[in-house]
Image (cartoon, rainbow, N blue to C red):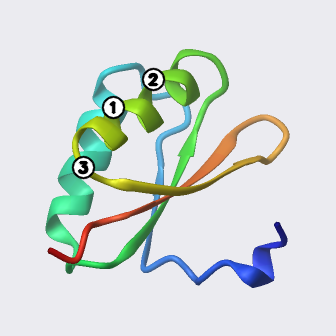
Amino acid sequence: MSVSSLSTPDGQLDLRGTPCPINFVRTKLRLEKMPPGSLLEVWLDAGEPIEQVPDSLKMAGYQVENIADCSGYFSLLVRRPSA
């Protein structure tokens, strides 16, 4: 999937170097401040953050649209539900 086929994020959050579960909490707080249906790009470290945060967001009712390996970190696109 190319970047051009993805919609442009409405916000960005750089959480590289942020430990679990703080990175999930910060992502969730940021999403709650955004309008319903908006898209947030989150940068996460490899290992525990990229293994834990997407699953936690899905369990919290958010839609993880894409995970990209950006060599050195991961870019996660997560959408706040419209309803």
- For the point 80% across and 47% down, the residue is 70
Give the labeled residue for mark 3.
61
- The answer to which of 59 and 50 lies nearer the viewer is 59
Mark 3 secondary-structure assignment: loop
Give the label, 3 or 1, closer to the camera. Answer: 3
Mark sitting earlier along the chain (3/1): 1
Q: Which amino acid does the dot numbered 1 rest on?
A: Ser
Question: Viewed as shown, does residue 74 lie left or right of 9?
Answer: right
Circle 2 crowding by C-alpha within 10 Å: few under 14, some 14–19, many from 20: some
Neighbour tally class for label 1: few under 14, some 14-19, many 20 plus, Cα within 10 Å: some
Which of labels 2 and 3 is toward the front? 3
Spot occupied by residue 76 in the image (x, y as percentages of width and height): 56, 51
- Give the labeled residue for mark 1: 56
Horizontal side of 62 relative to 35 (left or right) equals: right
**Mark found first going from the N terminus, 2 or 3:** 2
Instruction: Pick the residue in front: 30 or 4.
Output: 4
Callouts 1 and 2 close, C-beta under 8 Å: yes
Question: How much space separates mark 2 and mark 3, taking CA atoms?
Answer: 15 Å
Q: Quadrant of residue 19?
A: top left
> To which quarter of the image does residue 30 belong?
bottom left
Going by the image, does 18 lie left or right of 27? right
* Residue type of the residue flagged with mark 2: Gln
Give the secondary structure at mark 2: helix
15 shown above or below 61:
above
Q: Going 55% across and 23% down the picture, which residue do you hit?
A: 51
Label 3 with label 1: CB-CB less than 8 Å: no
Q: Position of residue 24 (x, y in %)?
A: 32, 35
Looking at the rendered image, the quarter that the N terminus falls into is bottom right
**What kind of residue is marked 3?**
Gly
**Is residue 32 shown above or below 50?**
below
Pointer 2 residue: 52
